[in-house]
Structures are given as C-alpha cells and as structure tokens.
Image (cartoon, grey):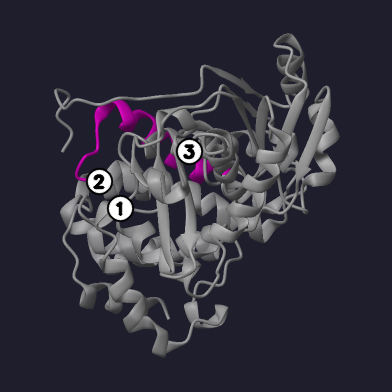
Amino acid sequence: MTASATPIEMLRPPRIEFGAGTAPRLGDWARERGLGRILVVTSPSVASMLPRLGLPGEVTTFAEAKPEPDMPNLDALLAVAGRVRPELVVGFGGGSAMDLAKLAAVLPGSGQGIRDVVGPERVAGRSVALAQVPTTAGTGSEGGTRALVTDPATLSKLAVQSRHMLADIAVVDPELTFSVPAALTAATGVDALAHCVEAFTSRRAHPLIDLYALEGIRLVGRFLPRAVADGRDAEARAGLMLASMYGGFCLGPVNTTAGHAVAYPLNTRLHMAHGLACALVFPHTLAFNAPAVPERTALILDALGAPASADPAAVRDAALAFCAGLGMEMRLSRHGVPADALPAMAEEAHGIRRLLDWNPRDISAAGILDLYRAAL
C-alpha cells in the first residue's frame, strides 16, 4: 500500500500566499500581471468580504454559488463567464465556489461541456488565469485539481480532474475564517480530517502523501476544538487552514474512499451540506476500516486524543466522542434523514467505484446500509 516505488504525481499551486493578512496580495498579484478583467465566483454569505482582496480593474461578481453546486448553477455561471470573457477567474469561498471557478476557467470558449470533461485529464486546456481564496477550512479545493457538480437528473456527482484546473495562486488567509460560525467550523473541520484520513488509509496511500495526510490529521485534532470554542483564535484558525490545504494536496494523487462515497447521497438526495454529511459518517467508516489498517488507525486516534485500538466499536466511540465534543449532533435522524431513504442511498453509494475500489476494506451495498442504520 505504501511502496515508495509506486509512481505518483503531485501538483500544487506554483504560488501559495499563506498567513494572516495575506488576502490583499491577490490584488497585488493581479496588478503585477496586468489582469484587469476579473470574474469572482462566490456566495452571498461571503461576498461582503470581497473588498479585502484589493482586486484591480473591472470586477464582475457571480455571487450565486450554491452549497452543493449542480449543473444549472454551473450553466448560469458559464453564461456570465461567456459574456465577461475574464482574464482572471477567482474562486472566493468554500469548496463549492472554488470548484465552480475551476470549471469557469476552463470551459468557456473551449468547445467542451461539463459531460465532455468528466473523469481524469479530459480538459483541453486553459487560457485565463485562475486564483483561489478559501473562506472556510474544509475542502482544500484551493490546492487541488478536482471539481464536482451534481447532475440533478441522476442525483450523482460529476467529478472532473485536470491539471488545467490547478490554481496559478492560492491565497490562504486565516482571518477570512474568523466569522465562520462554530457549527460550520466543526463540520468543515471534520471534512478536512476525513480527506486526510481517507487518503492515509487508502489502498493507494503513498509516503509522499502520508506526510501531508498525517500532519493534517494532527492539526485538526489539535486545533479544531480550539477554533470551535473561539472563532478568533488566530493560531487555531491558521492550523485548520493548513490542515485543509494539506487535505487538498491528498485528493489529486490519492483521493478519498468510503467515507466520501457514503456521504455523497446525503448531499445529492437530501441536500445536506457536504461537510456535515462527511462528519456524520466519519466515525462509522473509520471504524469499519480499522481492522484492515490497524496501525494507521492507531495513529489517527492518537492525533484525536484517544487510546489506540483496532476494535471497530472502540474506534467508532472515540471518533463519535471527538465530533460530539465539537457540539455536533451525530445522528442522521436528527438532521432529517428518513429511514426509508437508506436502501436507495446505500445502492447509490456502492456504485461510486472511483472511490470504493480504493477503500482498504471491501464493502457491499448491504454493508453500507448497515453503516447508515448505525448512524441513524
């Protein structure tokens, strides 16, 4: 699973500005390059922070990024991009805004539609600059090459991966997360944790990625409780932003496994926020996989302040205790998930082979249904 001879490619933004107060450096970067026609992809909740980027020239704002973007949302953005013809596209927000920005940078004028580019490395190219500025610590999309949108006809995620969607610059300013509410901080933080954990325990885990994955896990374990308790804890916010970015680095070369496959139907069918869905299933998939990766599970539990164990019940209880300690309600039923929806969700999750084929332990549709029922 971790043979160093396994070929791997790791891509990161060529320029990363990280640290408190770095947001205005994006405007400086754009001015240095003479980029004056700019399209910003964001959401209503964070659009008010846009002046902090100091962007020059003519700025068009698409502030309609949905929490779980779908094809109509993407089509609306592409129509704006086609009209504006930007020199620079900026993703400003959470993973949804950043994923949409990636697609807005590569699709207009390319002759390709979203269905033409689903899968690995099918994007023809990119002729505009791309910048990413996260305002949550969760997806790590600023450092990755993937974008996901939901097909409303099939209720499935369309996943695009391309080196052409790697940002030219990522500006990671923890101060932009100071106002994120505690509940959202907790959910997105566990999403970052899940990215790192699933990459660390994947069948294609790799030493190059393990460095980022394990450190990301440790950062979440150390700093997420602090950030939930005090949103203006600058050190904790910076630690979480770093963990999130490290999780993003894991996604291209290794990617996620069962945790995200099991979470996706909660997003697509029930419109649950991605971070919350990942958090709710995290203890159950971690516990299911523990017998297959006992040593790595022990390191994960240690990072979360729990005793080492490979016993699924003990692992589940430890992970549930960590999440509950963040103030999270960890029952699916308390978030409106009906029991009669679980069988169809299990079948849908089991069909996400691009993730499940790399899970450290095989799981059937019936096994996924058992996980859902345990989490209900």
Q: Quadrant of residue 161?
A: top left
| Rendered-image quadrant of the N terminus | top left
- Depth check: 286 or 24 in front? 24
**Residue 323 versus residue 266 in the image, above or below:** above
- Depth check: 345 or 104 in front? 104
The image position of residue 92, as x and y in percent, is 68, 39
**Residue 312 versus residue 161 in the image, above or below:** below
Q: Which of marks 2 and 3 is nearer the N terminus?
A: 3
Q: SS of the residue at dot 2? A: loop
On whether residue 28 falls in the magenta region, the answer is no
Instruction: Determine the residue located farthest toward the top in the rendered image.
Output: 32
**Residue 120 versus residue 289 in the image, above or below:** above
Q: Earlier in the sequence, mark 1 or mark 3?
A: 3
Q: Name the residue under label 3.
A: 111
Q: What residue type is labelled 1?
A: Thr
Q: In which quarter of the image is residue 127?
A: top right
Q: SS of the residue at dot 3? A: loop
Q: Which of marks 1 and 3 is in front?
A: 3
Q: Name the residue under label 2.
A: 202
Does residue 7 appear in this view? yes
| Rendered-image quadrant of the C terminus | bottom left
Disc 2/disc 3 C-alpha distance (Å):
36 Å
The image position of residue 128, as x and y in percent, is 60, 25
Q: Which residue is drawn at 41% across and 54% down?
A: 158
Q: SS of the residue at dot 1? A: loop
Disc 1/disc 3 C-alpha distance (Å):
32 Å
Q: Which residue is drawn at 20% across and 50% down?
A: 293
Does residue 315 appear in this view? no
Q: Residue 257 shows which numbered tag?
A: 1
At label 3, counting other C-alpha atoms closer than 10 Å, the crowd grade (few under 14, some 14-19, many 20 or more) is few
Over which residues does the magenta segment extend? 203-223
